[in-house]
Amino acid sequence: MSAIASMFSQSFFHGTKADMTPGDLIAVGHRSNFTEAAPLSWVYFAGTLDAAIWGAELAAGSGKERIYVVEPTGPVEDDPNLTDKKFPGNPSLSYRSRDPLRVIAEVTNWQGHPPERLQEMKDGLARLKAEGADIID
């Protein structure tokens, strides 16, 4: 691949509080950032930095919010939690895979959402949980 072609390649991102290094694999079997449900059988990622920022900001735990550039190692499909229910056509470029994601690099220069916007999102997720609608497919 030429330098010009790689410059325009799609990048994928994963937001989390896990401390990882290039070459590590993000695999199925971990809890979601957004619910207390059983460990997931999918790994989720996005083609937009904004979606990954939400993942990092909403991740459970007390670790540092992190965003990684990732590479899928197997088949990928649209994330039905967003594309089928909230944003038809996948404008958020949200995806999932049953195969691991390989960490390529960490994005270190990003800006989170304003505190009031983050609180709105957390309040919305709390409402979904209270209604029993916080299910992740």
Image: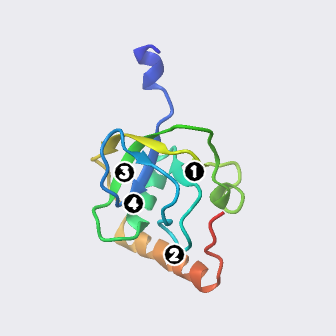
Q: Residue at x 62, y 39 (%)?
A: 75
Q: Which marked residue is nearer to the observer: mark 1 or mark 2? A: 2
Instruction: Quote the CA–CA distance across marks 3 and 2.
Output: 21 Å
Q: Mark 1 or mark 4: name the one nearer the start of the chain.
A: 4
**Where is residue 121 drawn, in percent x and y?**
49, 72
Which of 96/88 is in front? Answer: 96
Q: Position of residue 25 (x, y in %)?
A: 42, 45
Query: What's the residue at 58%, 38% (across, down)?
Result: 74
Establish if 39 lies above or below 98.
below
Q: Which of 41 and 110 is in front in this view?
A: 41
Task: Please tell me whether mark 4 sits on a helix, a strand or a loop.
Answer: helix
Q: Which residue is drawn at 63% across and 71% down?
A: 135
Q: Where residue 56 is drawn, which disc sits there?
A: 4
4 and 3 marks in contact (CB < 8 Å)? yes
- In this figure, which residue is indicated by the disc labeled 3? 67
Label 1 and label 4: CA atoms lie apart by 16 Å
Q: Are dots 3 and 1 in contact, CB under 8 Å?
A: no
- Specify few, some or many for label 3: CA neighbours under 10 Å numbering under 14, 14-19, or 20 or more: many
Sequence-earlier tag: 1 or 2: 2
Looking at the rendered structure, which numbered label has been put on residue 92? 1
